[in-house]
Amino acid sequence: MTDELTARTRFDPAEAEPRIMERWLRSGLFHAEPVGSASDNYSIAIPPPNVTGALHMGHALNGSIQDVLVRYHRMRGLRTTWVLGTDHAGIATQKQVEKRLVEEGTSREELGREAFVERVWEWRRSYGGTIVGQFQRLGASCDYERERFTLDDGYARAVLEVFCRLYDDGLIYRDHYMVNWDPGSRSAISDLEVEDREVTDTLYDIAYPLSDGSGELVIATVRPETMLGDTAVAVNPADERHAHLVGRSVKLPLVGRELPVIADDYVKTDFGTGALKITPAHDPNDFEIGRRHGLAEVAVIGEDGRMSDEAGAFAGLEVLEARERIVAALREQGLLRGEEPYTHTVPFSHRSGERVEPLISLQWFMRMDELAPPAIEAVTSGRIAIHPPSQSRRYVDWLEGIRPWCISRQLWWGHQLPVWYRGEETHVGSEPPQGEGWTRDPDVLDTWFSSALWPFATLGWPDETPMLRAFYPTDVLSTARDILFLWVARMVMLGLRFTGDIPFEHVYVHSVIQAPDGRRMSKSLGTGIDPLHEIDEHGADAVRFGLLAMSSTQDVRYSREKVEQGQALANKLYNASRFVLLNARPVTPAGPMPTRVEDRWILSRLQRVIADTARRIDEFDFSKAALGLYDFVYGELCDWYLELVKGREFDEELSATLLHVLSETLALAHPFIPFVTEEIWSAVPGSEGLLAGGSYPLADARLVDESAEREVGAVIEAVRAVRSWRSESGVPAGARLAARLAATGYEATSPLLARLARLELATDDAVDASPAVAAVSVPVPGGTVELAAGEHVDPRAAEHRVQERRSELEREIARASGKLDNEGFVAKAPPALVEAEREKLERLRDELRSLL
């Protein structure tokens, strides 16, 4: 493999990545046998992508994060498993198949339930594995041999077991209750599947005549179609305008039904006229008021999104058409008192995109009051740590205000409720009841109900399996904040309830990747970026690195520059490795024996980055870990160290150092850029097996050399200073300049400085004998480099540039000083920003002093 590597001048991801992934899969490395207990092992359960899905940027980011953690801990010697699987995604999958049926000129109703479900299974068998293959493209080291599905037989048994136990414990019940009805999917959805959008409607003022003919109450509403279901009018008991009307009645326009005027503290006196129409069947707040006052619940909108028989003459109309006709009728009867635009938030279904209808429906619910307190305690006590900590507060706040969860859905694809009815009898159980006349409930469970079992059901629960013993609780859940309530909190509640233990020890809430312009990524908006296209163009390592480098705990804009930075890193490491492998001598595996300062420097810097990278991974600070790795590999190793050793004989000492640094660097970088590092590793002399199964480097304090870091660090800064002066002065790149080093700390390193800065360093005697001493002084650590006048060094031009730089520095110092003298800035700006400004001011002053 060494010959193949050194023969190629560049790393070709399209050729190498599939070949390397195949080696990993054949090795069985990703498939850990269940040995020991969870405290001895490391596990992550992947947030199961929808079986309908294709890899998007959120998957790619989260997959990269999880793979860093899994590869890192595997290389740390822990028995590691990354549980893989997909979610049946009830509504989303059913919609996909129904769309196909429409194209075929049929429907699920025409097929019937059994045939339709079989069609969905066929669809899943054909397309369900797409996203799993795409995770392989990313390099994800999941256990592909144990792929799970939330509708496979073992998982379905776990779901039924949980439902039945919760029912037996009195936590699952059936009731008529207000739900969020999605007309698009013809199903109830949970509060967490509702998204509020700002909408401008018309606010209508409608006169409700008093029954005794003595006047009228004017009611403001944006939904006149629901007035047909009004059963009362409410006023605030403290509202003096209407207190005298409490106990009297009004006539419902267009219907004639008498409505009592009631008093309730919920009514806002500053909205409209202060009188509120109460429609218990079509508004969640009205529903609660209606239950408090014992009002009738008249449903005038049906589950099909059309007006019901209770709507009388308007029955069968779509809601918006009914609104138009009702407004026209009110206008004709002279009961409209005003119309004006009104902007407010309106609930829409996250699933279908249609406007949610609050309806009273007979559904199955789960009581949360008994499940929430232990889940709160798990976080407040620190048993589960949420990163960043600010997300812990959101988690706790939501659980403290939690309401019953509607868990039934009016779908055919999913876990059908294990409930049967015969007359007034109800049977709940994992097996059908005996006898004639039983009918099974047609509804299925909310997808999030089955997903809440993911960490333990995937490991074999309810059986006490070796996998469950070895890998539960899992170690980390990495997820986006939008499912902190939908999924994370519910996994904690059910994990504690059914296993007696937390489902994971850490929750890392990662950023959302936005489009480059700050909008959300969306195919419909034209802002989506396909990670697979990016992998095709730049390679998986580049995409992984870029996503990790741009990630944080805040939303971030997609940066193609970061991906290109990752591609440059992979190519730089590949080419540097070729240089080392082509030149280094075979050495015994005794390790480096450095005597040269530059060798001691790179070994010391390597220990620093090993320790820093491990710390950053442990703290879930993936961006700084990736960028710190880049700075070391691209900057210190490739741009500086390899330049420092050029020209040296590749003797045993240098070869040992180079091969050691290369091997350690490949292992260090492997969790981030696994493909290119694995490719190079196969060519390193003495390497055994796969790098993915190797050891992660540990920092060796004995190799930390602060003296070498100071000495070589000064050389690097001095070279940068001289190169900067050369560039600004237009000095040809190949020209060597006569100079004297008037600085301390370069006793062992002046030859390195001279070679890299292209200087002819003279002795003090030789320079003193020259009439052209110190035509230009370039500030460097410990003193100056004094350049003699010559063909490329013009003292007058140099002095002019120095004067310009002094003026520029004085302006920048004045600006920075003014900012720091501003008490408002110091008090309000983040402390880190204030400290950075102080450090900047000190650097500017140091530079100015060096030019005086």
Image (cartoon, rainbow, N blue to C red):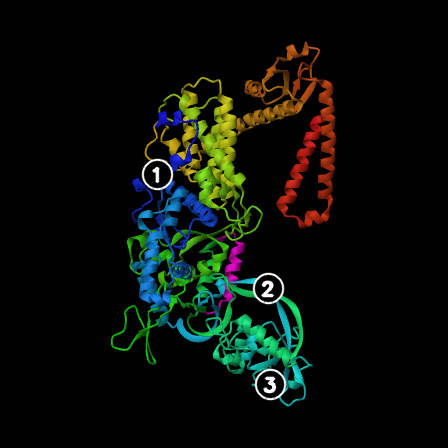
Residue stretch in magenta:
386-404
- What's the distance in space between the residues labelled 2 and 1, CA to CA? 55 Å
Location of the C terminus by quadrant is top right
Relative to 741, does residue 162 appear above or below in the rendering? Answer: below
Q: Is residue 165 inside the magenta stretch? A: no
- Please state which of residues 257 and 429 is positioned toward the viewer in this rendering: 257
- Report the residue marked by disc 2: 199
Circle 2 Cα neighbour tier, 10 Å, few/some/many (<14 / 14–19 / ≥20): few
Nearest-to-viewer mark from 2 and 1: 2
Residue at left offset 44%, top offset 56%: 383
- What's the distance in space between the residues labelled 1 and 3, CA to CA? 79 Å
Does residue 665 show up?
yes
In the displayed structure, does residue 508 sit left or right of residue 236?
A: left
Any mark on residue 251, and which? Answer: 3
Query: In what element is the residue under mark 2?
Result: strand
Query: In what element is the residue under mark 3?
Result: strand
- The picture places residue 247, in percent across and down from the top left corner, at 61, 87
Query: In what element is the residue under mark 1?
Result: helix
In the displayed structure, does residue 292 sit left or right of residue 822?
A: left
**Amino acid under label 3?**
Lys
Dot 3 or dot 2: first in sequence order is: 2
Does residue 608 show up?
no
- Please state which of residues 437 and 493 is positioned toward the viewer in this rendering: 437
